[in-house]
Image (tube, rainbow, N blue to C red):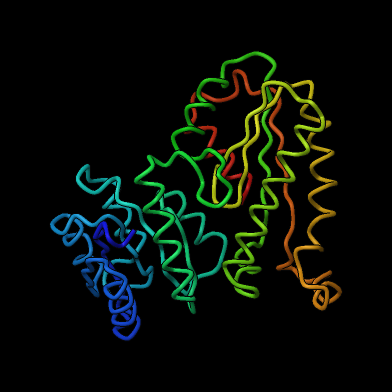
Amino acid sequence: MANVRYKLLIVEDDVDVAEMITAYFRAQGYEVMTVNWGEDGVRACQTFHPDLAILDIRLPDIDGYEVARRLRGDRRTAHVPIIFLTEKRERADKLQGLELGADDYITKPFDIQELRLRVRNALQRISQGSLTNPISGLPEGRLVDEHLGSVLQTDRVGLLLVSLENLDAFREMYGFVASDDVLRAFSVIIQNTMNELGIPDHFLGHLGPADFVLTVPSANVSLLHERLQSRLTQSLDYFYPLKDREQMLNRPDRLAVRIVEINPLRGRFSGVDQLKVELLRIRH
């Protein structure tokens, strides 16, 4: 991918971190511009026209959220993918970033190889029109929005939001390769469960990196909800190495499954945007 000569904008006030990221991505063949202030980041995005921006949240002047807000509000920069790089770990911080349209969120200290893969995946999604998730191969982005728009006013259709919680904590413990394997296995279990139940006219896609949205006939929603809750919960132990399973049982950052059910969909939302905001609110 680096042979395409993608352009990255780094907005980071920690000089050591900024220099490390810049040197690494330049060595990978990317064209990189680095600034240390939020206001400079906004201006650089308008003139440098990056393919992707990596934003620290804690900056000396305006914070990364405000930088993202301004980028999203300017038609020249509204579609630039954003990866937040920050020390903040609270759900409220992540939710704020997602609401601003961030494509990803990485906490410090981070693995530079993981950051490289996150950048690569985000650029792949853009080059492919954000049609499929690079890990699971399932629809995301525009394909999911188009499908949800088509079923919102359809009779006898329900929705399940299936979330794999604490995947970030798992990634910090075992690395990005292991976390990708978990996400891939999680998606396969969902698909196999729907197929085994013989549910007609179903749809499965990503609402977020670890959030899956399913639409199925209303008559199948409750049974599918029950079956997925059981199967996915039972699978969680096997994602951990055998030596760690017992100690992970009661930890608050252990992998967990959360399923939200909306049945039926018809008449409850004015459009896809309202539905997605409500799902994010319930999810977090």
Vertical position of residue 86 compared to residue 148: above or below: below
Residue, far bottom: 16
The residue at 56%/41% (across/down) is 138
Residue, far top: 155
Q: Left or right: 148 with respect to 214? A: left
Q: Left or right: 281 with respect to 249? A: left
Vertical position of residue 17 compared to residue 147: above or below: below
Quarter of the image where the N terminus is located: bottom left
Residue, far front: 3
Q: Left or right: 44 with respect to 145? A: left
Pick the front one: 241 or 9: 241
Residue 93 drawn at (x, y percent): 50, 62
Pick the front one: 97 or 143: 143
Residue 94 drawn at (x, y percent): 51, 59
Residue, far left: 47
Vertical position of residue 147 compared to residue 28: above or below: above
Residue 95 drawn at (x, y percent): 51, 54
Give the total number of marks visible in the rendering.
0
The residue at 60%/15% (across/down) is 154
Q: Left or right: 167 with respect to 269? A: right
Vertical position of residue 125 compared to residue 192: above or below: below
Pick the front one: 109 or 21: 21
The residue at 63%/44% (across/down) is 282
The residue at 78%/38% (across/down) is 193
Q: Quadrant of residue 197?
A: top right
Residue 262 drawn at (x, y percent): 69, 31
